[in-house]
Image: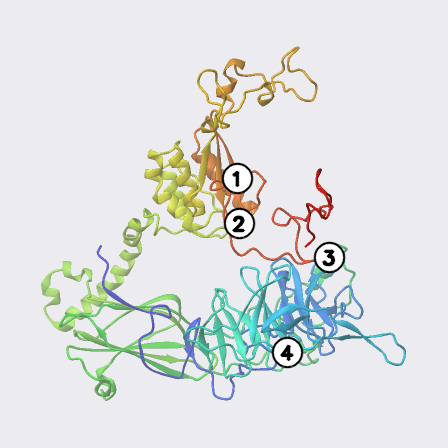
């Protein structure tokens, strides 16, 4: 079946809007807008970006746990077993040494990061035992860059003893919020420099960015932070109306002052936060199960009294300090008032669509939408062979438009376009709700021309225009059912294309036909590889099979995986034994000796500790066999090359090498160390980005060498002081 021409309207390709009224746009799609006066301001002091992110003082952890900074600066956590907020198990009064915590967040490694507004430091605490893992900061600003600083303890003038405060140097940074990115980096907004500072998991400063680009101005007072599912960093600008969106490279890709493009407001099934700070939790455990809950050390927690709310209540409410809000005897269960009051009606109008031919019969509209009970989406369509202007279209009477109402549905919704034939199509959509519920439109696809199975029926059934239109729309019902079966056959060519077949990323779950496709040609793919690498390997498999077992085949396999052309040294090419009547005494030849193989020879090479028991091979062929069937692959890698990548690389080499050849893999880091088995052009690479070693922060290794003791001054034999020497 040939694919029909279509128009795709979505956030990626563009909505092609002519007008919009009463509709709100976000990353999740189009919905009915909130009523005026009910919108939460983006610059709310809580830092929740108008309800679209966690407030600065609240963080969600694994297992449904919540962490909260109270108004008194204490750190408490929500225990789902006890159904209440409790102080953290360690620390003095729940402070854990924090002077003024203003923001918290949780990392994927099971650590809670707390930003101390007074000490200007970030503290990492283990969620398992609340042990202090590390601290970094404060930083001073030097020429717009952050440099580590060391605060001094405050001294009480009366007693001369520390008073528990810190004296910070001038030009200190002013961090306001923290966020953890999907790649593990930690972002901190700094009002002093107007930048976002990025740290690695150890707290080492990696980079700073003001987000400026050719199209966007720098950040103006970065404050609250939030991270989208795709890694986009949302930054509230205190000195400008709106929110800036930063891409993975740290540059601003868009700005919004009305919430457009931002995540939908937080209305999770297990957690909700009201404008006044009230926290609603809906994850409850039966009271009988609470004595079996364990504390972080693994001990069974004791029974702590009855449930705060009756068992039949589905919600628990807490104020901004974590204190439970209880119901009354008449109304023991609390119910959350709906904060988001929406308009009951909204409308979209799309630009004119051109079918390219006179008398085009428009087929159907496919909506990716959610329409809850009590909400409706109406599709209005009008077509004509004349390219009418906007004023003429707006002046059309309501009777000129065909209306198709779409009821409750989730996912794909299909509706027939019931207009008369015409080259140009105008579409409008009316959203209707009850003031609380709203339809959501994520994408819209318009297909044309109509190509139903009615054309295979007797022509007399379509002799009249009305009969033909009804028959075509009636047969569309069966065409949809048939398309669900034949669609798999239509998609079959994409399944056998290595660059198009579905493939899950490394470590992710989902449909992955790439492994199935590789199995057709005998390839076993490692799911720890990235999808792009696996696609290239399958695509080039036919060519690789022709050169498998050769040096070129091994080189190409490694190049596909790493993206770098490796150097392969075959050891037999290194033979340079000094042979009688065949070699020259020019320094390039080497003498053969028993210490190379270390075979045990009685009365010859038998010193304990030097010989080795070799049970194979002929001693007469050792000069040849010593370097036969061996090779070394030198692969330049970047600093981020991990042990996991090395194991995958070794698997690639093992699969591509000949069975009788032993291949060693040698990875080369971007460094240049002379005198350590250095072969210029083979196992050396001129790298960049080598960081300067800093005391208390750098780890000694191959990249850092300690200098030896200074040379002692001495006179060479025959040298006379004052005659043959000169002091400079």
Which numbered disc, 3 or 4, marks the residue that appears first in the sequence? 4
Residue position for label 3: 292
521 vs 587: above or below: below
Which residue in the protein does label 1 denote?
666
Secondary structure beneath disc 4? loop
| Mark 2 vs mark 1, CA separation in Å | 13 Å
**Does residue 211 appear anywhere in the picture?**
yes
Question: Closer to the camera, 677 or 25?
Answer: 677
* Residue positioned 20% across, 62% down in the render: 452
Distance between the alpha carbons at the discs numbered 1 and 3: 52 Å
Front residue of this view, candidates 673 and 7: 673
Instruction: Give the number of the mark in front: 1 or 4.
Output: 1
Q: How many marks?
A: 4
* Mark closest to the chain's N terminus, 1 or 4: 4
Q: Give SS at disc 3.
A: helix
Q: Nearer the viewer, residue 404 or 614?
A: 614
Q: Return the residue at label 2.
A: 670
Q: Position of residue 257 (x, y in %)?
A: 47, 82
Residue 179 location, quadrant: bottom right
> Residue 260: x, y in percent?
44, 77
Mark 1–mark 4 distance (CA, rounded to whole Å) = 58 Å
175 horizontally vs 585: left or right: right
3D distance between C-alphas at marks 3 and 4: 29 Å
Q: Are there few (<14), some (14-19), or many (20+) residues within 10 Å of tag 4?
A: some
């Amino acid at each position: 079946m040939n694919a029909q021409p279509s128009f795709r309207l979505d956030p990626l390709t563009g909505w092609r809007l002519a007008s919009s009224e009463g509709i709100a746009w976000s990353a999740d799609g189009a919905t009915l807008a909130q009523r005026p006066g009910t919108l939460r301001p983006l610059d709310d002091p809580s830092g929740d970006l108008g309800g679209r992110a966690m407030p600065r003082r609240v963080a969600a952890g694994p297992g449904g746990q919540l962490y909260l900074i109270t108004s008194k600066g204490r750190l408490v956590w929500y225990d789902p077993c006890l159904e209440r907020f409790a102080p953290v198990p360690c620390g003095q009064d729940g402070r854990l040494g924090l002077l003024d915590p203003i923001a918290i967040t949780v990392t994927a490694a099971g650590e809670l990061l707390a930003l101390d507004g007074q000490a200007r430091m970030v503290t990492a605490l283990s969620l398992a035992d609340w042990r202090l893992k590390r601290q970094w900061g404060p930083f001073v600003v030097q020429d717009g860059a952050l440099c580590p600083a060391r605060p001094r303890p405050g001294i009480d003038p009366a007693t001369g003893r520390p008073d528990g405060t810190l004296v910070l140097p001038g030009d200190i940074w002013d961090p306001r919020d923290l966020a953890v990115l999907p790649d593990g980096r930690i972002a901190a907004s700094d009002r002093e420099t107007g930048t976002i500072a990025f740290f690695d998991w150890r707290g080492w400063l990696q980079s700073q960015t003001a987000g400026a680009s050719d199209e966007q101005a720098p950040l103006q007072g970065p404050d609250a932070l939030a991270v989208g599912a795709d890694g986009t960093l949302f930054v509230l600008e205190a000195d400008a109306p709106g929110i800036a969106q930063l891409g993975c490279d740290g540059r601003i890709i868009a700005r919004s002052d009305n919430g457009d493009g931002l995540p939908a407001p937080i209305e999770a099934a297990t957690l909700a936060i009201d404008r006044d700070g009230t926290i609603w939790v809906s994850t409850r455990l039966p009271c009988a199960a609470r004595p079996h809950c364990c504390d972080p050390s693994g001990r069974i927690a004791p029974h702590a009294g009855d449930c705060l709310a009756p068992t039949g209540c589905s919600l628990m409410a807490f104020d901004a300090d974590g204190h439970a809000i209880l119901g009354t005897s008449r109304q023991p269960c609390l119910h959350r008032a709906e904060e988001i009051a929406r308009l009951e009606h909204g409308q979209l109008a799309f630009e004119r669509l051109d079918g390219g031919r006179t008398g085009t019969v428009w087929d159907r509209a496919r909506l990716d939408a959610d329409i809850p009970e009590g909400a409706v989406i109406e599709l209005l369509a009008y077509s004509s062979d004349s390219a009418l202007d906007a004023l003429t279209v707006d002046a059309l009477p309501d009777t000129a438009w065909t209306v198709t109402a779409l009821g409750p549905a989730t996912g794909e919704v299909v509706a027939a376009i019931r207009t008369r034939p015409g080259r140009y199509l105008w579409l409008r959509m009316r959203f209707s709700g009850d003031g609380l519920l709203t339809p959501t439109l994520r994408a819209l696809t318009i297909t044309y021309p109509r190509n139903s199975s009615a054309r295979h029926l007797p022509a007399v059934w379509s002799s009249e225009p009305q009969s033909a239109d009804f028959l075509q729309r009636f047969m569309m019902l069966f065409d949809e059912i048939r398309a669900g079966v034949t669609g798999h056959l239509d998609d079959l060519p994409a399944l056998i294309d290595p660059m198009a077949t579905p493939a899950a990323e490394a470590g992710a779950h989902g449909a992955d036909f790439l492994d199935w496709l590789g199995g057709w040609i005998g390839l076993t793919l490692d799911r720890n590889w990235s999808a792009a690498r696996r696609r290239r390997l399958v695509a080039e498999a036919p060519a690789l099979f022709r050169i498998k077992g050769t040096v070129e085949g091994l080189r190409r396999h490694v190049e596909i995986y790493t993206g770098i052309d490796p150097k392969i040294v075959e050891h037999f090419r290194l033979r340079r034994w000094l042979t009688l009547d065949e070699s020259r005494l020019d320094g390039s030849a080497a003498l053969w000796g028993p210490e190379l193989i270390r075979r045990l020879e009685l009365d010859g090479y038998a010193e304990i500790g030097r010989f080795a028991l070799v049970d194979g091979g002929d001693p007469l062929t050792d000069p040849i066999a010593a370097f036969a069937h061996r090779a070394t692959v030198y692969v330049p890698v970047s600093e981020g090359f991990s042990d996991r990548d090395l194991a995958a690389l070794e698997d690639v080499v093992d699969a591509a090498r000949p069975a009788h050849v032993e291949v060693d893999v040698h990875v080369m880091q971007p460094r240049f160390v002379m005198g350590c088995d250095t072969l210029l052009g083979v196992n050396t690479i001129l790298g960049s980005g080598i960081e300067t070693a800093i005391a208390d922060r750098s780890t000694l290794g191959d990249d850092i060498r300690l200098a030896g003791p200074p040379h002692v001054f001495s006179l060479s034999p025959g040298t006379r002081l004052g005659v043959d020497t000169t002091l400079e």
